[in-house]
Image: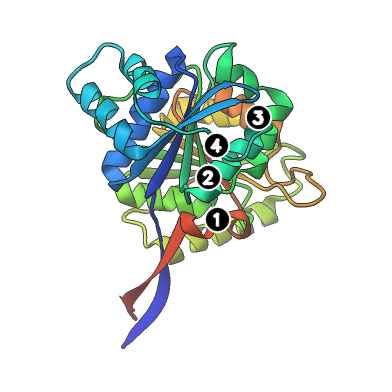
């Protein structure tokens, strides 16, 4: 007898690269290229020069940059900079604060993934400090892949993910486990789910066990993983513990869930301070994902999969 159950399938069809042409932007550009090749996606770019200075470059123009990277150019970011200077580009219709402009571009172009770097102290990284960064992550309606200062540039034209680290609080509303499971399947990668207990180590043993069972059911039921995930429970400060476990697990990407309820705007799922510290200290990209009901519809698709009972 056959039964139909939903299997979640994510797709990154349109990627937005936020760049300021700094050294960190080259790493972000390389990751955007790798994801685009893997997903057969289009890449849009927004040049952020200052709080009220933005320029957009369309996907067709970016194809020139990617060809240059594959040919071994020493400075692909300079090529991208030249594209903004010599090829037609446009200014976003919506002006104002960076988070308003980026989110407007995301919505108008149905962006599925925002890629940005946080290197350096000027340009885009400077604009993404503190409350500005929190507002951007709070308001953008798609997942955000952040390239921190310690992330190395991937091999040009490829994206090799062998290990995925999911930091979770076992909340069923979070879409982070689904993204982590999808990445593990897409790349045949090992998936490790980490839960950090930062209060009394003995107070919630039962709830932790129940949470592990719940998150395991959520991932395996929806994603039909190619291999069994590993589950780790540690005690300590969330950010420091996530980074410490990452040193052992050696992930190629860390997936974090973030909830920003409206209109209260109080972070309840993963405090911004924790996310910021993980991004700043991680040696791999960090994918920050909002709750299911907060993601734009274009971010994911549901497909029917036939399973045997």
Contact, mark 4 vs mark 2 (Cβ under 8 Å): no
In this rendering, the label closer to the viewer, 1 or 4 = 4
- Which residue position holds label 1? 296
* Pointer 3 or 1: first along the chain: 3
- Mark carried by residue 133: 3
Marks 4 and 2 sit apart, C-alpha to C-alpha, by 11 Å
Q: Position of residue 226 (x, y in %)?
A: 31, 55
Instruction: Report the residue at 55% width, 27% height from top.
Output: 54
* Pointer 2 or 3: first along the chain: 2
Foreground pick, 291 / 71? 71
Marks 1 and 4 sit apart, C-alpha to C-alpha, by 20 Å
Marks 2 and 3 sit apart, C-alpha to C-alpha, by 16 Å
Q: Position of residue 262 (x, y in %)?
A: 76, 52
Identify the element where label 3 is drawn. helix
- Mark carried by residue 106: 2
- Which residue position holds label 4? 92
Q: Is residue 94 left or right of residue 59?
A: right
Contact, mark 2 vs mark 3 (Cβ under 8 Å): no
In the image, is residue 267 above or below residue 32? below
Marks 3 and 1 sit apart, C-alpha to C-alpha, by 20 Å
Q: Is residue 267 left or right of residue 20?
A: right
Which residue sits furthest left? 71
Instruction: Report the residue at 38% width, 30% height from top.
Output: 88
Instruction: Report the residue at 34% width, 26% height from top.
Output: 87
In this rendering, the label closer to the viewer, 2 or 1 = 2
* Pointer 1 or 4: first along the chain: 4
């Amino acid at each position: 007898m056959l039964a139909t159950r939903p299997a979640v399938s994510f797709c990154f069809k349109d990627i937005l690269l936020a760049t300021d042409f700094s050294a960190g932007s080259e790493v972000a550009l390389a990751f955007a290229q790798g994801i685009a090749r893997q997903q057969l996606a289009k890449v849009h770019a927004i040049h952020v020069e200052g709080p009220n200075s933005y320029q957009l470059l369309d996907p067709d123009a970016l194809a020139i940059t990617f060809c240059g990277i594959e040919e071994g150019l020493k400075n692909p970011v300079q090529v991208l900079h030249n594209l903004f200077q010599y090829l037609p580009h446009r200014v976003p219709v919506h002006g104002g604060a960076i988070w308003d402009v980026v989110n407007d571009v995301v919505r108008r172009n149905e962006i599925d993934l925002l890629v940005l770097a946080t290197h350096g102290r000027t340009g885009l990284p400077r604009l993404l400090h503190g409350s500005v960064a929190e507002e951007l992550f709070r308001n953008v309606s798609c997942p955000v892949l952040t390239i921190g200062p310690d992330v190395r540039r991937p091999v040009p034209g490829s994206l090799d993910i062998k290990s995925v680290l999911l930091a979770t609080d076992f909340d069923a509303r979070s879409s982070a486990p689904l993204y982590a499971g999808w990445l593990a399947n897409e790349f045949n990668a090992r998936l490790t789910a980490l839960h950090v207990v930062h209060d009394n180590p003995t107070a919630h043993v039962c709830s932790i066990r129940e949470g592990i069972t719940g998150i395991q059911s959520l991932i395996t039921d929806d994603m039909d993983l190619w291999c069994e995930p590993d589950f780790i429970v540690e005690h300590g400060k969330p950010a420091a513990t996530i980074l410490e476990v990452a040193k052992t697990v050696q992930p190629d990407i860390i997936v974090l869930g973030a909830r920003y309820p409206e209109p209260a705007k109080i972070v309840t799922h993963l405090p911004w301070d924790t996310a910021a510290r993980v991004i700043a200290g991680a040696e791999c990209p960090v994918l920050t994902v909002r709750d299911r009901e907060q993601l734009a519809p274009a971010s994911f698709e549901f497909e029917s999969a036939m399973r045997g009972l």
